[in-house]
């Protein structure tokens, strides 16, 4: 158990472990026996190791949904929902600016310089970036696209959706936490019975 | 060796040889212009001289699909596409029925020639038959290779995901047609056709069967990959669509209230993410075995730096404190001087500053005290100033300069009569 101390600590601190953030630990967590051991240890703390639907990311969840746990989940859910639209818009912006085929997913890499050069080439992307950067989730006060980009990416990194392998290089990798976010979106769509599958305006898809 | 030579001269004597060679060379000679035509879809007549243009038209390399435009013949297009593995234009031709018909005819001609004992003719028919069979299997091979190549580049020749999905659907239809083609080949028929002829049997049955089963194997592999790729593209598409539509929905419904999932009796797993716990630890001296390690740590503390930073903060506090102290002292001094002036007003005779200082046991330096009295007097409004007589008891310090040191000041109130006397 001793050797898993650092991993346990990272999980306890609220980190999401995926192949991008820590491949070694991720593979360790695929071992069910180890997860059982960790869960045994975590039990008094009312925590357990959880993973998302496709098993691409591990994190800690509550065992018992006590009053405190629910209170915290409520706060967290509210802030996630508040950052939902800006996050989705950011994903769309990156996908379009970089001319990617599909939506961003874990493991995708983004070079800030590439992204910036694509955005400043296109007036509508500049406007969308400015709109996004002004959102209270990102809180950029600058009117320069390069500063806005830096601030937006910095915030998203703080939120855990991006990993920066080298501290001094502006080069990011999308983490598995994004998968969790997409799962949440899918869940909300299904659960709220949002009829956005068919009646969604077509121009949005083109937009 | 001599036979090979003979065959070679035989081939060269064929009139087709010269013509074919000439036409291939013609293509090579105008490769630049032809490739441009291939990529642009049409060719400008101005690229060639009148004579060359006529030659290319006669050689069936170029043609006029309509009056205005000049372009490559489809077969040339296909040749280039196949040579360059250009999957945008490469065509898959899996028309098996035609091949089988020709094979049937060819076998009949062959058997006819054999019955007549025409060795040369039967040899010729055998060659054509072999080519025909090879064409057919080669066509399958080409088609499969083409699909495979497109799969492995993940349909990189089209940019959008939607186009990729369409391409996969196309590839699936092509695959189905190839499989249908396999179905048409009836080996019982072919066995009957070959009869007891060993060479024919080998060509039409055993070799063909081996090739077809080989192709079936690769087709199966292609099919697996197609399904996988399709699933992946569909997933990507679904994801992009989900993101687009959810963000559109949220933009259109800014006040949309999402359910209070954390407080439902069944909290969904996707919402259940525990709060981070920060486990902190501090220096503890209650275990003797740790004392060495802690002492080590304590020694390793960069002392100089620590002191510096500490003294810095201290100095900062200190100067601030001193400033505060000075300010309060200054106030006290001014107040004491004020009291002194009040005393002067109340007293009938002049008062000496130094005496007052000693009598009241005030803590000020005499010099500072006298200075303050003079300053206070100077600072009075003109009218009030005239109410006081301030005499400086000073002495010249040295004969060589004009420095006077004030030893004492005596202050008295100027009464009305004095005032008049001087006034």
Image (tube, coloured by chain):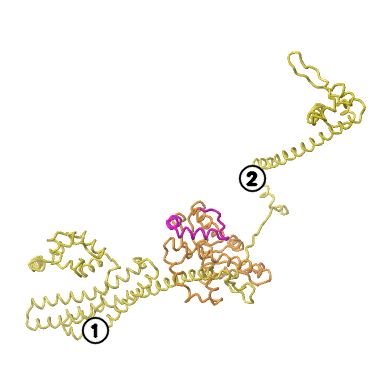
Chain colours: A orange, B yellow
Q: Is residue B224 left or right of residue B25?
A: right
Q: Label 2 belongs to which residue?
A: B300
Q: Which quarter of the figure has residue A76? A: bottom right
Which x, y percent locates residue B343?
Answer: 89, 31
The question of residue A141 being in magenta is answered with yes
Q: Is residue B52 left or right of residue A206?
A: left
| Residue at the image point whose x is 8% and y is 68% from the top | B15
| Residue at the image point whose x is 47% and y is 70% from the top | B239
Q: Which quarter of the figure has residue B265? A: bottom right
The answer, for residue A196, to whether it is visible in the render is yes
Which x, y percent locates residue A30?
Answer: 53, 68
Q: Label 1 belongs to which residue?
A: B187
- Count of numbered marks: 2
Whichever of callouts 2 and 1 sits on the residue coming sooner in the sequence is 1
Q: Is residue B347 left or right of residue B279?
A: right
The question of residue A82 being in magenta is answered with no
Q: Provide the secondary structure element on which disc 2 rests.
A: helix
Magenta part of the chain:
A115-143
* Residue lying farthest to the right in this orientation: B348
Q: In which quadrant of the rendered image does the C terminus of chain A lie?
A: bottom left
Secondary structure mostly seen in the magenta stretch = helix
Circles 2 and 1 on the same subunit: yes
Q: Provide the secondary structure element on which disc 1 rests.
A: helix
- Whole-Å distance between the Cαs marked 2 and 1? 88 Å
| Residue at the image point whose x is 60% and y is 74% from the top | B259
């Amino acid at each position: 158990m001793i050797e898993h101390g650092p991993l346990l600590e990272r999980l306890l601190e609220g980190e999401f472990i995926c192949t991008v953030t820590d491949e070694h630990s991720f593979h360790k967590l695929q071992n069910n026996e180890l997860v059982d051991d960790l869960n045994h240890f975590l039990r008094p703390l009312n925590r357990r190791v959880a993973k998302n639907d496709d098993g691409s990311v591990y994190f800690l969840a509550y065992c018992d949904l006590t009053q405190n746990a629910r209170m915290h989940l409520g706060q967290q859910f509210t802030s996630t929902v508040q950052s939902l639209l800006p996050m989705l818009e950011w994903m769309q912006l990156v996908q379009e600016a970089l001319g990617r085929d599909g939506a961003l997913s874990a493991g995708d890499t983004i070079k800030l310089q590439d992204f910036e050069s694509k955005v400043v080439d296109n007036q509508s992307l500049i406007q969308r970036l400015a709109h996004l950067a002004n959102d209270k989730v990102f809180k950029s006060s600058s009117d320069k696209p390069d500063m806005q980009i830096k601030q937006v990416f910095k915030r998203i990194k703080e939120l855990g959706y991006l990993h920066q392998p080298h501290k001094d290089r502006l080069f990011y990798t999308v983490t598995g936490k994004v998968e969790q976010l997409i799962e949440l979106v899918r869940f909300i769509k299904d659960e709220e019975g949002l009829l956005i599958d068919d009646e969604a305006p077509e121009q949005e898809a083109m937009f | 060796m001599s036979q090979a030579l003979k065959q070679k001269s035989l081939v060269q004597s064929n009139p087709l040889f010269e013509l074919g060679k000439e036409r291939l060379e013609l293509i090579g000679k105008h490769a630049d212009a032809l490739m441009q035509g291939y990529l642009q879809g049409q060719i400008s007549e101005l690229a060639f001289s009148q004579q060359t243009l006529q030659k290319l038209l006669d050689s069936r390399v170029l043609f006029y699909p309509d009056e205005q435009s000049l372009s490559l013949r489809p077969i040339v297009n296909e040749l280039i596409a196949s040579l360059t593995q250009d999957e945008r234009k490469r065509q898959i031709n899996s028309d098996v029925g035609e091949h089988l018909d020709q094979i049937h005819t060819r076998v009949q001609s062959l058997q006819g020639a054999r019955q007549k004992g025409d060795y040369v003719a039967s040899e010729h028919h055998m060659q054509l038959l072999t080519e025909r069979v090879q064409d057919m299997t080669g066509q399958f091979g080409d088609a499969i290779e083409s699909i495979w190549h497109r799969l492995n580049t993940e349909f990189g020749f089209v940019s959008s995901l939607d186009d990729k999905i369409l391409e996969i659907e196309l590839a699936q239809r092509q695959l189905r047609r190839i499989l249908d083609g396999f179905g048409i080949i009836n080996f019982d028929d072919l066995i009957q056709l070959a009869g007891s002829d060993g060479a024919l049997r080998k060509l039409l049955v055993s070799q063909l069967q081996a090739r077809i089963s080989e192709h079936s194997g690769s087709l199966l592999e292609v099919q697996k990959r197609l399904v996988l790729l399709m699933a992946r593209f569909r997933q990507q598409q679904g994801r992009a669509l989900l993101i687009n539509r959810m963000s559109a929905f949220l933009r259109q419904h800014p006040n949309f209230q999402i359910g209070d999932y954390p407080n439902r009796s069944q909290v969904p797993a996707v919402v259940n993410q525990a709060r981070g716990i920060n486990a902190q630890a501090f220096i503890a001296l209650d275990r003797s075995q740790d004392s060495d390690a802690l002492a080590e740590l304590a020694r390793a503390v960069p002392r100089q730096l620590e002191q510096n930073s500490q003294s810095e903060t201290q100095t900062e506090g200190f100067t601030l404190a001193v400033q505060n102290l000075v300010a309060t002292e200054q106030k006290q001094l001014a107040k004491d001087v004020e009291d002194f002036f009040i005393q002067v007003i109340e007293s009938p005779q002049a008062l000496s500053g130094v005496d007052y200082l000693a009598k009241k046991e005030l803590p000020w330096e005499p010099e500072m005290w006298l200075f303050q009295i003079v300053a206070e007097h100077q600072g009075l409004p003109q009218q009030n100033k005239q109410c006081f007589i301030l005499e400086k008891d000073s002495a010249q310090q040295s004969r060589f300069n004009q420095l006077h040191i004030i030893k004492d000041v005596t202050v008295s109130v100027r009464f009305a009569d004095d005032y008049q006397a001087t006034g």
